[in-house]
Image (spheres, rainbow, N blue to C red):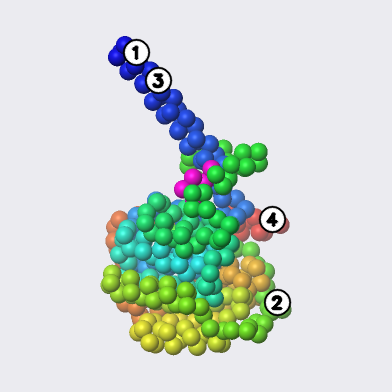
Amino acid sequence: MAKNRFGRNQKYIMAMFMVLILLFVLQRLVVPKYMHGIVEGAMIAEYYEEEKDHDVIFIGDCELYENISPAVLWTDYGINSYIRGSAQQLIWQSYYLMEETLKYEHPDVIVFNVLSMKYDVPQNEAYNRMTLDGMRWSMSKVNDIKASMTEEEHFVEYVFPILRYHSRITQLEQDDITYLFDKENVTFNGYYMRVDVKAAENVPTGKPLGNYQFGDNAYYYLDKMVELCEKEGVELVLVKAPSLYPYWYDEWEVQMEDYASAHGLKYYNFLEMTDGIGLDFTQDTYDGGLHLNLSGAEKMSRYFGEILQDECGIESRRGDEHLEQVWEKKLSDYNAEKEEQLAKLDSN
């Protein structure tokens, strides 16, 4: 009898194990892959496959991952950098990504783009997912989800994404099969490359706001960034990228200048440095001034690289044999993608 019970228990355990495997595969199948079209949802997860030995980590929204090229920072300055960016990355999401990153490595500088100060409350599930789903599980992710959820969202659906995406089973595409267990990189050290050109024309000016004051919640997380970087001995640098839109109000600029001064932080508004950078918004943007294209991002990176070297004290690591080998492969892929995109552009 005991032997029969043991045999039955084994069968139950095996059956449960098979069910769990099936649910795991089904969940992997229905979760969006973000390999084509809206690729921003694949960016956050790419970081975990990187060697964690960066001099500079950029954290923020599209004003970083489309405007800064780590490849140029390496080739021109020997700076090993990575961008932990995602679409409409809110400041609390940036904070928890910063907290998580500092558990993996200890960069000399963390750069944060301040545009997200304009948001004080959770905004949109679709954008939340593009940041949160790619994070590995940790208390940083748990707290990030809690801070980010809209009223319509449920924590359990982040724990078990199949509850959120089960309806996609009738909308599967080839990518869902091709990238079921393994994905390709969509960025180059976090940089999203675009070589096409759409000149900035008739860029709208800012509409008057009823209140220009950044919210308490936004300042709360900015304070936490400052405290965390001070604790970890990392220099926090604030920037405003040279994107012409969304509009950056003078009243917002004053607040950032005052905050940086009060906390002893470096703050660079690159909107005020476009001439020095050499940006030409008839040629250096692919979407009318919202983001820089490859030409603009490489100009921006050369300009900022000099600042990182001269004003932030980031020393060149050219000559590091291992890093040279790592970047040889990265630059090969970067240049191949550049040539492929330019060829497609020429053929249209």
Horizontal and vertical percent position of residue 35: 56, 49
Give the label on residue 201, or none: 2
Residue labelled with disc 4: 347
Image position of 102 with respect to 253: above or below:
above
Specify which label sits upstream in the sequence, 2 or 4.
2
Horizontal and vertical percent position of residue 246: 61, 75
**Dot 3, how many residues are within 10 Å of its Cα: few (below 14), some (14-19), or many (20+)?**
few
Between 284 and 242, which is closer to the camera in this rendering?
Answer: 242
Between 129 and 233, which is closer to the camera in this rendering?
Answer: 129
Q: How far apart are marks 2 and 4 (CA)?
A: 25 Å
Q: Name the secondary structure under disc 3.
A: helix
Q: Distance between the residues labelled 1 and 3?
A: 11 Å
The residue that appears at 32% across and 18% down in the rendered structure is: 6
- Quick check: marks 4 and 1 in contact, CB under 8 Å? no
Specify which label sits upstream in the sequence, 2 or 3.
3
Check the image and name the residue furthest to the front: 1
Residue 315 visible, this orientation = no
Check the image and name the residue furthest to the top: 1
The residue that appears at 44% across and 25% down in the rendered structure is: 15
Give the left or right position of residue 166, taking residue 333 as reference: right
**Dot 2, how many residues are within 10 Å of its Cα: few (below 14), some (14-19), or many (20+)?**
few
Residue labelled with disc 3: 11
Quadrant showing the C terminus: bottom right
Q: Name the secondary structure under disc 1.
A: helix
Residue 2 visible, this orientation = yes
- Quick check: marks 2 and 3 in contact, CB under 8 Å? no
The residue that appears at 29% across and 14% down in the rendered structure is: 2
Query: Which residues are the magenta region?
Result: 158-162
Specify which label sits upstream in the sequence, 4 or 3.
3
